[in-house]
Image (spheres, helix red, strand yellow):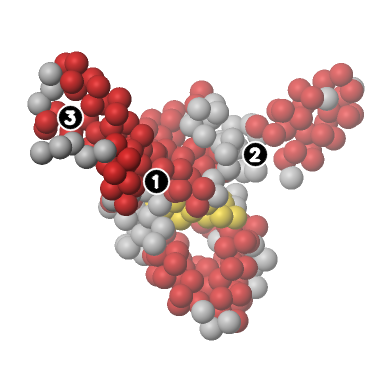
Amino acid sequence: MRAAPREGLEMKLRSLKLPSFVAHHGEVAGRAETGGWRFDRFLDELAGLELEERTRRRIERLLKASHLPADKTLATLDLARLPPAVKRQVPTLCEGGFIERTENVLAFGLPGRGKTHLLSAIGHELVQRGYRVLFIAAFRLVQHLLAAKRELKLDAELRRLDAVDALIVDDIGYIQQDREEMEVLFTLLAERYERRSVLISSNLVFSQWDRIFKDPMTTACAIDRVVHHATILELVGSSYRSEAAKKRTDGRGDEGGAKAAKEAEA
């Protein structure tokens, strides 16, 4: 049987949506001929290249959809500044086992202690492992939920978020905290309870969450749901931002440095 012309083969591979086969079949065929490969090794080599490329493209799509801060990765996280107990937990959290167990991660600490960077870094690692991640500020998340509720589309929005394996809600203590906001946020947490993972950063400890949920019973129920299966990370120490501001203002005198550090803490 005569070999099919290369143009015909490439057209068929494109129709089958095998771009790596199209790009590399000639090169791999040359190596196979030189090395005397069996047909199954030739196909295995091409299939491996196709899978690698598909994985790379999928991770690119997941990363774009995640809205994770591009600069807040594990590579840029100063692990030496983390409390020892937190530092020990980071590698395990990055593996994503807590997602498989539908557990939550809660990061507490005063402003500037690295909560956002830590959860973002974990999120980046989860994306590399193929998990669907969404990073969103708490106030923006509440705005989306309120808008969906007004348009009678809250159920649809909750279903959309349900497709996310790890929902990172940043700075939960900064929402406006009126009753409508409390209700949609509580609904979200209740919907994800024991079904999907939530990662939350907060400068408010649990005893202050009544500022968020107002009603004592709702506050207790919300805390119960997020804590039931959760890893709690407590970030202490000095503020990253105030230290950075102090370094920038060392040459401006004590008064200027103190003012900049105070502003950075806010």
Look at label 3 and name its amino acid. Phe
Residue hosting label 2: 112
Residue 119 rendering spot, x and y as whole percentages: 49, 43
Secondary structure beneath label 3: helix
The label number, if any, that marks residue 58 in the structure image: 1
Label 2 residue SS: loop
Q: Residues within 10 Å of mark 1 (few under 14, many from 20)?
A: some
Dot 3 alpha-carbon crowd within 10 angstroms: few under 14, some 14 to 19, many 20 or more: some
Question: Where is 238 relative to 186, above or below?
Answer: above
- Counting residues from the start of the chain, the first of labels 3 and 2 encountered is 3
Identify the residue position indicated by label 3 in the image: 42
Instruction: Tell me the mark number nearer the camera, choosing from 3 and 1.
Output: 3
Residue sitting at x 32%, y 63%: 195
Q: Tell me if label 3 and label 2 are in contact, CB under 8 Å.
A: no
Q: Are marks 1 and 2 in contact (CB under 8 Å)?
A: no
Q: What residue is rendered at 46% in x and 43% in y?
A: 60
Residue that sits furthest to the top in the current view: 34
Please indicate whether residue 153 sits to the left or right of residue 18 in the image.
Answer: right
Q: CA distance from mark 1 to mark 2?
A: 33 Å
- Residue 185: x and y in percent read 52, 68
Amino acid residing under circle 1: Arg
Q: Which residue extends farthest front?
A: 2
Q: Earlier in the sequence, mark 3 or mark 1?
A: 3
Asked whether 193 or 223 is in front, the reply is: 193
Would residue 82 be found to the left or right of residue 179 on screen? left
* Residue 153 placement (x, y as % from top left): 51, 79
